[in-house]
Image (spheres, rainbow, N blue to C red):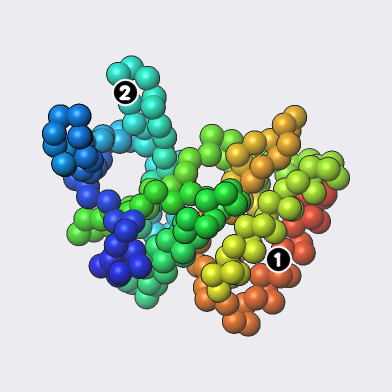
Amino acid sequence: MASAALAHFKLEAEIFPTYTSHISYRNDRARGRRKEKVEKRWYKDKVLGHGTFGEVCLEIYRQGDSIADTRAVKKIEKAKMQSWNVDYERELLALAQFSKVQYEDEENLVKFFGFFENADAVFLAMEYFSYGDLAQYLKSPLSEPEIKQITEDVVEGLKVMHAEGFTHRDLKPQNIFVVKKFPEPWWVKIGDFGIAKRRSMDALKSWRKLRSIPTLLICGH
């Protein structure tokens, strides 16, 4: 299903009930080998949430007894997407566009590591956030400096999206993920591009939602 724009992000994978195995190849010049096969196993840890078309799970990569890396994997069930007449390649395309080299230093959009699939589902491998999303921190008002920090990150993330001709269409605290929080300076990233759309009249709707963010942060819910 991968188009030319997405081919770079497709991961070779074998999917098992408790883990996913990815195969890659690297040069090992020290041993005189041009290509060496490398397997990396990601084990399912827990379900982070459920959506209309599937679930999001935390997966862990171990080296020995230590956790070497983590990721969030979003499962998109093809049958459900087809029944709703939704094109799941749209989210893949958005993630690929926002993962261009020139945006690596922006750090305001959720990182995309690649995708893999089987006959029943597509799996999106993305950055995991141990602090969760912003919604849970809005039970009480935030200070003005905190609001400024969060709003600046959101604005910078939207600049990247708009530079690629996309609008988010569902910008809300549940889709803003927390990297760092008070007492450190806040650092957040925009995620969940499932309904990102090429910019048109939706730009006005996106702007209205952006203007409402400071009010949400000040007032809580």
Q: Quarter of the image holding residue 25?
A: top left
Q: Are marks 1 and 2 in contact (CB under 8 Å)?
A: no
The secondary structure type at the circle numbered 1 is helix
Looking at the picture, tell me which residue is in the foreground, 210 or 105.
105
- Counting residues from the start of the chain, the first of labels 1 and 2 encountered is 2
Label 1: how many Cα within 10 Å (few below 14, some 14–19, many 20+): some
Is residue 8 shown left or right of residue 159? left
Which quarter of the rendered picture does the N terminus lie within? bottom left
Tell me if I can see residue 142 in this picture. yes
Of circles 1 and 2, the one toward us is 2
Choose top left, top right, bottom left or bottom right for residue 57: top left
Residue 180's spot in the image, x, y percent? 64, 36
Camera-side residue of 87 and 37: 37
The part of the image, by quadrant, that contains residue 70 is top left
Q: Position of residue 197 (x, y in %)?
A: 52, 73
Q: Amino acid at mark 1?
A: Lys
Nearest to the observer: residue 90 or residue 28: 28
Helix, strand or loop at label 2? It is strand
Is 183 left, or right, of 180 in this rendering?
right
Residue 183 vertical position relative to residue 102 in the rendered view, above or below? above
Q: Report which residue position mark 2 lands on.
A: 63
User: Residue at point 73% right, 53% down?
Assistant: 152
- Determine which residue is flagged by label 1: 209
Q: Amino acid at mark 2?
A: Gln
- Residue drawn at (41%, 40%), measured in percent from left and top? 71
